[in-house]
Amino acid sequence: MRMPARRETVTPGPPPRLVVETGPTFPAWTARAALLLLATGFGAAALQTTGLAPSFVWGVALGLGIVTAYLPAPPVPHLLFLVGGVVLLVDGTAPFDPAVFALLPLGHLVLRAAWWSDHVPPGARAELRALAPDLRRVVVLQSAMLVVALAVRSVALADVSSAVAAALGGLAVLGVVLLVRPRD
């Protein structure tokens, strides 16, 4: 059995001074404020299809936004997304509700803002450079979602051949496979 190497004793004195430099940062409250705005917008966009009074819709949407901003941990924003989908399913127009064009990007942005709000503790600051890869990913995914949504809308409104519909379905399956594939 090997014996651990003997360490030199540290002489008493002041601890070494460390200097850490960071780039531009943003406070945690900005992520929560963005989450509040996005979640309120998502709730209002989902509830506008119900035909309820606008003041009631905005009141409920603001309440959902406050709850989501206060509790950004994973179950709450996902439940907001689920509620939006259920409302659209129950009260939406068939076969395709145009509110999806607002709900898909807003829902994705709500989930990303909730992730940042949950991972940056209150009172802390995060470096803007850490946000850049996530923002690039958001732009790519939002663009892809818009293209798929427009393709689905064109298929739903027009009578297209089954070959075109099958090709669009294959692209949608490929997109799902790419989304669930583990990242490095």
Image (tube, grey):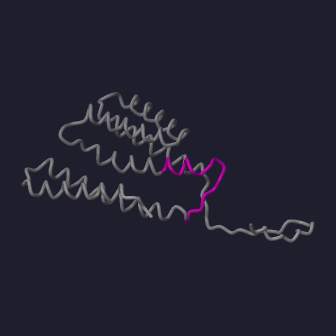
Measured as percent of width and height from the top left, residue 89 is found at: 27, 35
Given residues 162 and 112, the one toward you in this image is 162
Q: With 45 as the anchor, is 125 left or right in this view?
A: right
Residue 68, percent across and down? 50, 39
Above or below, 57 relative to 34? above
Q: Quadrant of the C terminus?
A: bottom left
**Residue at point 24%, 55% (across, down):** 172
x, y percentage for residue 44?
38, 38
User: Bounds of the magenta span?
Assistant: 113-129
Q: Position of residue 14 (x, y in %)?
A: 89, 66
- Residue extending farthest to the front is 1
The number of numbered badges drawn on the structure is: 0
Q: Who's the residue at 13% across and 48% down the image?
A: 157
Question: In the displayed image of the protein, which residue is found farthest to the right?
Answer: 12
Q: Quadrant of residue 91?
A: top left
As drawn, 65 above or below 118: above
Q: Is residue 178 left or right of residue 116?
A: left
Relative to the observer, which residue lies in front, 7 or 29?
Answer: 7
